[in-house]
Amino acid sequence: MSVRRCVLPLVFWGVVAMQAQADVASGVAYLEAGDITSAVTAFQTGFDAGEADGAFYLGRLFELGLGTDVDMQRAAALYQAGAGAGSAKAQNRLGLMHLEGDTVLQDFGRAAELMCAAAESGEQEAQFNCGLLHAQGRGVATDQAQAVELWAAAATQHHVAAHNLLGQAYQEGAGVSQDSTQAAYHFAKTAAAGNAMGLYELARAHASGTGIELDPVKAHGFANLAAVRGLIEAQAFRDRLGVQLSPEELEKAQAFARDWKAIPIDQAQ
């Protein structure tokens, strides 16, 4: 009897935890399908059953005004509840609120404590944000090498902005040895996904042959793609390249941009 009293609760709570996770996952699916009412029910059920991320998603609904009025106070309270229950997503979002002084006190130390704790659990947005704090010396000591390490961790989870900042770090030799080939690699990853900064930096690399093959045609094509995504400097760069190309090269460059297709970053080589 005593053995059964020990084992059954463990099995029971394991089932409860799995159900709570399933409720939150269902809530995300409902949210993506536009069914806010069902999403709220699923998130609340999951949180009540012990899944901390349920509070995070409820907080986002209040913060964004999805299915309700915007209520930053309730959002902050839900993030606080989720963070206290161990949600890395809630820790990261609450940390950002402390960083910005939005609804809660601006407190760089508390922001770093929350976001970097979430980063340690593997939350990619928190890894990116904690890296920024180390790069800027806000709430933590300035440590560019630590920033690079955190961005690299986020990049392994296909975080676009982390790839871009790694590209910049390798360009400049900030926190890591300068390496134009590695810089081009990271920009090529985000460019393939259609990111404007990655496209522009890849255009610049092809134009100079820095870290990648010299190819003025591709340089113009990538600059063209970045320009249409709103980068003013890319438009000016494209136009400067255009006057240097022959009519045949310019035609090829425009055909390259016209035929180019973005692919998800997790599928980029």
Image: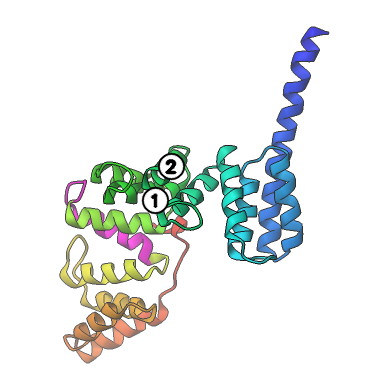
Image height of 43 relative to 15, above or below: below
Determine the residue located farthest toward the front in the rendered image. 105
User: Disc 2 on helix, strand or loop?
Assistant: helix
- Residue under numbered circle 2: 119
Q: Quadrant of the C terminus?
A: bottom left
| Drawn side of residue 207 relative to residue 198, left or right | left
Q: Nearer the viewer, residue 82 or 200?
A: 82
| Drawn side of residue 34 relative to residue 165, left or right | right
Q: Nearer the viewer, residue 59 or 100?
A: 100
Q: Quadrant of the N terminus?
A: top right
x and y, in percent, of residue 166 in the image: 29, 53
Q: Residue at x 30, y 56 (%)?
A: 165
Residue range in magenta is 174-191
> What secondary structure is the stretch in magenta mostly built from?
helix
Name the kind of residue labelled 1 in the image.
Asn
Counting residues from the N terminus, which is met first, the one under dot 2 or under dot 1?
Answer: 2
| Drawn side of residue 14 relative to residue 101, left or right | right
Q: Residue at x 27, y 57 (%)?
A: 167
Name the kind of residue labelled 2 in the image.
Ala
- Look at the numbered discs 2 and 1 and tell me whether their residues touch, using CB distance below 8 Å: yes
- Residue under numbered circle 1: 129
Q: Is residue 187 magenta?
A: yes
Q: CA distance from mark 2 to mark 1?
A: 8 Å
